[in-house]
Image (tube, rainbow, N blue to C red):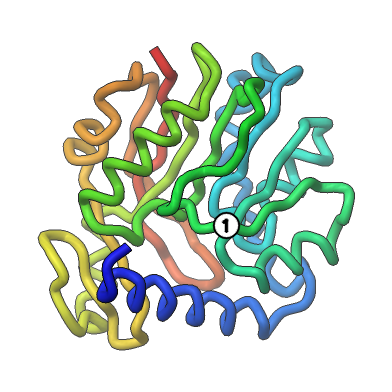
């Protein structure tokens, strides 16, 4: 990792740790939107497999899946987020690591990787490498379920943009970074997978309307 990239990484980790350190329980952060319900049949198909919640944050989705009887590994690079997961339910397996440095999970039984609003913070090259690592992590015919920022979200954020890092990748005035996608861009990035469903949607997220793309693809 070069010095500039390492500096950005440490800055982003600090931002997220500060955000999660303000909260000590899932109830402080819980969203009523459990968006993964619509993919329930695909999760059920992999019920005897392990689900990796990549960039789990406070663990909302991990907790939901665990309560449905799934074997879940909750992962995040924010130690403060992982502490919330543990405080909420220490029976859920949790791991703290930076997904850009690889995914240090050596389980050969990964049926689903779930990434909810967690893979839109990186350069294009890093995003390509990350999706390749997700592909490699999955068992044959495993599913990647995701949602990322839509380009429409940029219209909501544009007054908060401080710096253009690269096309569709920005630093906000808060110091946080964000990447925005359209369906064509995310489909191209996931071209090694079999695309099952990709859609653009919006919902109210912690009191604010958010525009995103969600979908499910399968390792071919």
- The foreground one among 11 and 210 is 11
- The foreground one among 134 and 48 is 134
Q: Quadrant of residue 60?
A: bottom right
Q: Position of residue 25 (x, y in %)?
A: 79, 71
Secondary element under disc 1, as helix, strand or loop, is loop
Residue 194 located left or right of residue 162 = right
Q: Quadrant of the N terminus?
A: bottom left
For the point 65% across and 14% down, the residue is 45
- The foreground one among 117 and 157 is 117
Residue 146 located left or right of residue 81 = left
Q: Quadrant of the C terminus?
A: top left
Q: Position of residue 151 (x, y in %)?
A: 22, 56
Residue 128 located left or right of residue 104 = left
For the point 57% across and 57% down, the residue is 97
For the point 65% across and 33% down, the residue is 51
- Decide: is 141 above or below 8: above
Q: Position of residue 4 (x, y in %)?
A: 25, 75
- Decide: is 188 above or below 94: above
Q: Position of residue 102 (x, y in %)?
A: 46, 46
For the point 66% across and 18% down, the residue is 46
Q: Which residue appears farthest toward the front when viewing the image? A: 2
Residue receiving disc 1: 97
């Amino acid at each position: 990792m070069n010095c500039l990239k390492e500096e950005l990484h440490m800055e982003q980790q600090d931002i997220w740790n500060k955000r999660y350190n303000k909260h000590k329980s899932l109830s402080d952060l819980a969203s009523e939107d459990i968006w993964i319900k619509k993919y329930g049949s695909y999760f059920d198909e992999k019920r005897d497999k392990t689900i990796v919640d990549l960039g789990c944050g406070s663990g909302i989705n991990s907790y939901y899946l665990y309560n449905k009887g799934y074997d879940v590994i909750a992962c995040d690079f924010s130690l403060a987020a992982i502490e919330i997961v543990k405080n909420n339910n220490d029976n859920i397996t949790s791991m703290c690591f930076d997904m850009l440095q690889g995914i240090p999970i050596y389980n050969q039984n990964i049926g689903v990787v779930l990434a909810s609003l967690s893979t839109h913070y990186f350069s294009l090259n890093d995003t390509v490498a990350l999706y390749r690592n997700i592909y490699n992590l999955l068992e044959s015919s495993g599913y990647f379920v995701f949602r990322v920022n839509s380009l429409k979200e940029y219209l909501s954020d544009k007054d908060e943009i401080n710096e253009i890092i690269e096309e569709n990748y920005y630093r906000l005035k808060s110091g946080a970074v964000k990447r925005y996608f359209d369906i064509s861009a995310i489909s191209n990035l996931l071209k090694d997978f079999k695309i099952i469903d990709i859609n653009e949607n919006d919902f109210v997220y912690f009191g604010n309307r958010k525009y995103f793309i969600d979908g499910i693809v399968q390792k071919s």
